């Protein structure tokens, strides 16, 4: 005939048995925690598979991080009930990323986005960092090296049909228009030229935008040799 062995038991929130004999078992059925009496008896010791396997309780939205074989609760990446992911610190990519990087949902990074390597195409419904704010697909970009006047060489670009110096502006035209006029977003690399400290862009229409480059005294510069990089994003795609 089978024998049923029943350990000491209790049903109470966060209750730890206080008087267990050495090796005696007791279970709290409220949270399904099993305790064993320590050497010499006394307050029960919570049984776990191992220190490394124990899962910390943590706080709301925290995630787990392995710290030298031990799981610890971490604030580095937080996940809310609606699956929003937040990274209070910096996102560092050490290796090159090629092809397409797809971020679904809402990625919110109040810190800096540090990329060491190269990123292909970024597809993202809502990517925000302290330094950049990009949305949609990169539809054009590259590098322009000014020759000082007229039509400029667009060999080192993609998605650009022409670049012309008009007055004090570099006027760039896309090969295909942006999906929605107001969905154009342009980022500029630091211009390479003596005395240049500023580069700004402005949209003319769904296929044309202007870039102005100036020195520390706000004098606009279009001189030959100015070298600047840029990327154009279509937030509607």
Image (cartoon, grey):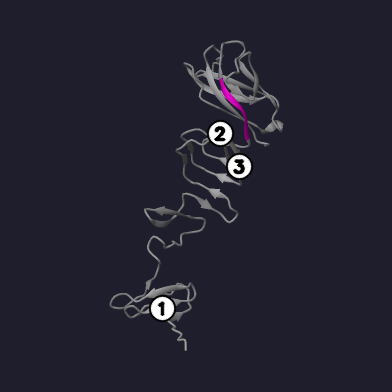
Label 1 residue SS: strand
Q: Residue 234: x percent and y percent?
A: 65, 33
Residue reaching furthest to the front: 1
Observer-side mark, 2 or 1, equals: 2
Residue at 49 percent of width and 46 percent of height: 88
Say which mark, if any, is on residue 120.
2
Observer-side mark, 1 or 3, equals: 1
> With 138 as the anchor, is 72 left or right in this view?
left
Which residue in the structure is indicated by mark 1?
26
Which residue in the structure is indicated by mark 3?
126
Q: Residue 28: x percent and y percent?
A: 45, 76
Q: Nearer the viewer, residue 168 or 123?
A: 123
Q: Is residue 56 magenta?
A: no
Return the disc, 1 or 3, that comes first in the chain's sequence.
Answer: 1
Q: Residue 75: x percent and y percent?
A: 46, 52
Residue reaching furthest to the bottom: 1
> With 216 as the anchor, is 175 left or right in this view?
right
Tell me which segment is drawn in magenta: 137-143
Q: Quadrant of residue 36?
A: bottom left
């Amino acid at each position: 005939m089978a024998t049923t062995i029943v350990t000491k038991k209790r049903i109470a929130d966060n209750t730890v048995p206080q008087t267990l004999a050495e090796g005696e078992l007791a279970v709290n059925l409220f949270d399904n925690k099993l305790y064993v009496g320590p050497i010499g008896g006394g307050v029960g010791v919570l049984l776990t598979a191992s220190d490394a396997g124990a899962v910390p309780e943590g706080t709301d939205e925290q995630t787990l991080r392995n710290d030298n074989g031990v799981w610890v609760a971490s604030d580095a990446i937080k996940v809310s009930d609606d699956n929003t992911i937040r990274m209070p610190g910096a996102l560092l990519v050490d290796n090159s990323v090629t092809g397409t990087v797809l971020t679904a949902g809402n990625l919110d990074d109040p810190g800096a986005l540090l990329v060491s390597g190269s990123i292909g195409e970024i597809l993202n419904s809502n990517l925000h960092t302290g330094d950049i704010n990009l949305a949609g697909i990169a539809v054009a970009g590259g590098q322009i090296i000014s020759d000082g006047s007229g039509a400029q060489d667009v060999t080192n670009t993609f998605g650009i049909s022409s670049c012309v110096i008009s007055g004090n502006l570099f006027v760039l035209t896309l090969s295909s228009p942006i999906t929605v006029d107001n969905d154009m977003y342009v980022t500029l690399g630091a211009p390479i030229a003596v005395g240049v400290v500023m580069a700004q862009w402005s949209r003319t229409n769904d296929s044309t935008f202007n870039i102005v480059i100036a020195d520390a005294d706000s004098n606009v510069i279009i001189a030959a040799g100015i070298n600047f990089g840029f990327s154009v994003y279509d937030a509607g795609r």
